[in-house]
Every structure is written in structure tokens, then in C-alpha cells.
Amino acid sequence: MTSRRVGLLDAEALEALPGRCSACVFWELGGPRAATSGVTEEGAASKRAWLAGEMVIDGAPGRVIRIVDELAAYVLFAPARALATRGLGVPVPSEDALVLATAWVEPQWRQHGLGRLLIQAALREAHRREVGAVEAWGDRRFSEGGCVLPAAWLLHEGFVVHREHPRHPLMRIDVRRTVTWAGSLEHAVAELLERVRPTLAPNGAPVPSPAGPVRQGAAR
């Protein structure tokens, strides 16, 4: 049977992220997007240091999904105090929320519910940390390669606009209201794999969706 698993966003997982994601410190330190600034060793080192600090303070600041031993998706989340301050005019996250900063799904694995599974992982972590909600900034003009999640996708997955902004509204989903919806992560994985399995070739290799990729998250 093909090996598939959900794991922590730790130092090993960080090395498996796409180059622009493993070196981008847009959310962590407020740097420019790696897609525009280029992938640098300095950026990668800064991201590793930030992740190491969060591992000590609060635990892993995200999750990854591996399919056929290859990283297929990841999500980054952290308390607001651990993330870079956003520009003037952008809504400030709530004190009782875990911030879902960004997420990414490998193009060939989009349209299989991995994005929803990543949100469930953030909700589960918020519940573990005993915070009341998960919040995320949305981008109403999202384009592939952006670091801010598509606002339309967040709305589709159950978020509501919590604090308005012309381009980057702060969106929120309540943990207590969705604890049943989130369920157990293990059960969600099982349901996901039932949908994914028909897209695997007999040798276990992934087969790209004929419908093409869907932008489920920011390609950081």
C-alpha cells in the first residue's frame, strides 16, 4: 500500500518544501516574498532559526502532508506574536486566535481536499492550545505565488469576514463551532485517501488531475 502520512512542520519537513517556500520569511520576519526576492541561503537560515524557536516555545508551527513519501502540502500557523507585524491599515488578529498564515498544495494534488485537511489541522492545533478561533488574512486579488491565502477559498471553507479591509480582510472560523466538523485528523486523512486513491497509478505513482490544478492556497 502506498505510504501516506500527516506530520509536523519541523526542521526535516522544512528542507522538503519547495525552494521558494523554505527560504521565504514573509510571514516570519516580514521580508519580501521569495518569489520576488529570490531564494537565498540567508533567508533559509533565518526561517530555520525562526522555526527552531517556535518548536521550543509552542511546538511545531504547522503541518505537512506526504503522499508516496513526497511532500504534497503544508500549512503554516502561529500565534500573532510570533509573526511579523503587517502594514498599517491591515486588521489586527484577535488575542484568542491562532493565525493561519499560509498554505500550499502541490499542483498535481489539488482538487483532492488537501486544503481542507490543512485547515482541519490548524483547528485541531487551536483546540489543543485552548484558543477560541483560527484567523487568516485573505487576498481578494490572489495570484499564484502569493503569500496570502485566497479570500474566496477561505470563505468556501467556512471562514467569515471578521474585520474588513479592501484587499486583505481578516477572516475567522470559530473552533468551538467547528469542533465536530473538524473531527479527528486521522479520520479526515482516511476520508481523503479514499478520494485520492483512484488517482494513483498501479505502481503507486501520482497521476496529475486531468482537470488541472486549482489554486487552493498561496504558493509560498
Image (spheres, grey):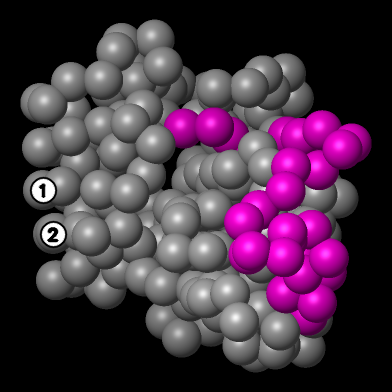
Vertical order, 219 against 78 (above or below): above
Magenta stretch: residue 213 in it?
A: yes
Question: Does 177 sit left or right of 136 as displayed?
Answer: right
Magenta stretch bounds: 191-220
Q: Is mark 2 on a helix, strand or loop?
A: helix
Vertical order, 204 against 170 (above or below): below
Q: Which amino acid does label 2 sit on?
A: Gly
Q: Tell which of 120 and 179 is nearer to you.
A: 120
Residue at the spot 52% in from the left edge and 64% down from the top edge: 68
Circle 1 sits on which residue?
49
Q: Are marks 2 and 1 in contact (CB under 8 Å)?
A: yes
Residue 106 image offset from top left, x and y in percent? 59, 43
Q: What is the CA distance from the residue labelled 2 to the residue labelled 1?
A: 6 Å
Question: Does 132 sit left or right of 18 as displayed?
Answer: right
Residue 154 image offset from top left, x and y in percent? 75, 47
Residue at the spot 89% in from the left edge and 36% down from the top edge: 211
Q: Alpha-carbon neighbours of circle 1 within 10 Å: few (<14), some, or many (≥20)?
A: few
**Extreme residue toward the right, this view:** 211
Q: What element carries label 1?
A: helix
Q: Which mark is residue 53?
A: 2
Q: Which mark is residue 37?
A: none
Residue 187 image offset from top left, x and y in percent? 70, 89
Q: Which amino acid does label 1 sit on?
A: Ala
